[in-house]
Amino acid sequence: MRRLLIAASSAAALLLTVAACGSEDSSSAAAAPTGCTPKVGKADLVKAGALTISTNATLPPMQYLDSSSKIVGMRVDLGDEIAKLLCLTPKFVNIPFDAQIPGVQSGRWDMIDTGMFYTPERAKTVKLVPYEVQGVSISVAKGNPKKITSEDDLSGKTIAVEAPGYEFDTLTALNKELKAAGKKQVTVRTFTTTADAYQALSAGQVEGVAIVEAVTSYYQKDGRFETAVKGMNPAPLALGFGKQKPADAVADALNTLRSNGYLTKLFKKYGVTAYTGDLKVTTGAISAK
């Protein structure tokens, strides 16, 4: 049976901070290097000389708001480094996850950098470049009061997810297996942001939160929540694009960052598994490798 990962967060101050998702005014402090020519022309960018990047800053340590409301985290570090190689200024916008694909399709931003899972269906709607691998985890309250240690233990439990996405689909697949085995299914509750899901867990309204393992591990390390189950349904994550030229340029930048060792160091710092397949615009089925 597939394994599930759920992440939970209980520090009220941080939850309130990361819940502030939706501003398009946030930007990275990084600037384009001087003396080089942008690798992507103004005709293929939202703003000439800038790489406009959407994220949902509710997932520490991957992307979140610090105490000064600046977007920080692994994916911001990666976006800054990509923009630098392209001789562009990175401009991050903080947008709820469910608005990201429509926004890149309509030309409101150039790139989605938010931990979006790769699926063949999604690759039909936007151009995707896989670059890391994550599984879905389950975070539970400190002390694991429900004694959840396996996928079977999720039977009959109420689990929170951010607006329907890969975590929702993963739990839906698990429910099919539970039903076939004659067991109670998981009640899946959706929330606007992961921060909202964590607040529900803190309030005892749900018994777990499903999110990528990097996030559940973050909260377990600081002692606020525990990772009850990990490694469910691992899959590549991808950067998303509306246009071909920015997608190809970013893929080239990722290959440079792989060859010069930057990706290895970045992923090690954040406890992330690298995708070992081709770093290019991809369609069709791929493996979590």
Image (cartoon, rainbow, N blue to C red):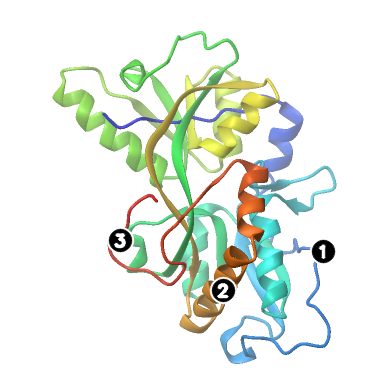
Please state which amino acid type lies under the numbered disc 2. Answer: Val
Q: Measure the C-alpha gap from mark 1 to mark 3.
A: 35 Å
Q: Are marks 1 and 3 in contact (CB under 8 Å)?
A: no
Give the Cα separation between the discs numbered 1 and 2. 20 Å
> Which of the labelled discs sits on residue 130, or is there none?
none
Give the residue displayed 75% in from the left and 61% down from the top.
Answer: 26
Q: Where 77 sits versus 49, above or below?
A: above
Residue found 15% across the figure and 18% down from its top: 182
* Dot 2 alpha-carbon crowd within 10 angstroms: few under 14, some 14 to 19, many 20 or more: many
Q: Provide residue 183's location: percent of width, then percent of height.
A: 21, 17
Per the image, label 2 sits on a secondary structure element best described as helix
* Residue corresponding to mark 2: 250
Three-letter amino acid code at disc 3?
Glu
Q: Earlier in the sequence, mark 3 or mark 2?
A: 3
Who comes first in sequence, dot 1 or dot 2? 1
- Relative to 287, say whether 146 is above or below: above
Looking at the image, residue 234 sits to the left or right of residue 249; the answer is: left
Where residue 141 appears, as percent x and y from the top left, is: 57, 17
- Measuring from the top left, give residue 17's x and y in whole percent: 74, 40
Q: Residue at x 73, y 34 (%)?
A: 14
Tell me which corner region of the image, top left, top right, bottom left or bottom right, holds residue 255.
Answer: bottom right
Quadrant location of residue 170? top left
- Say whether disc 1 or disc 3 marks the residue closer to the N-terminus: 1
Which quadrant holds the N terminus? top left
Which label sits on residue 121? 3
Where does label 1 land, which residue? 29
C-alpha span from label 3 to label 2: 21 Å
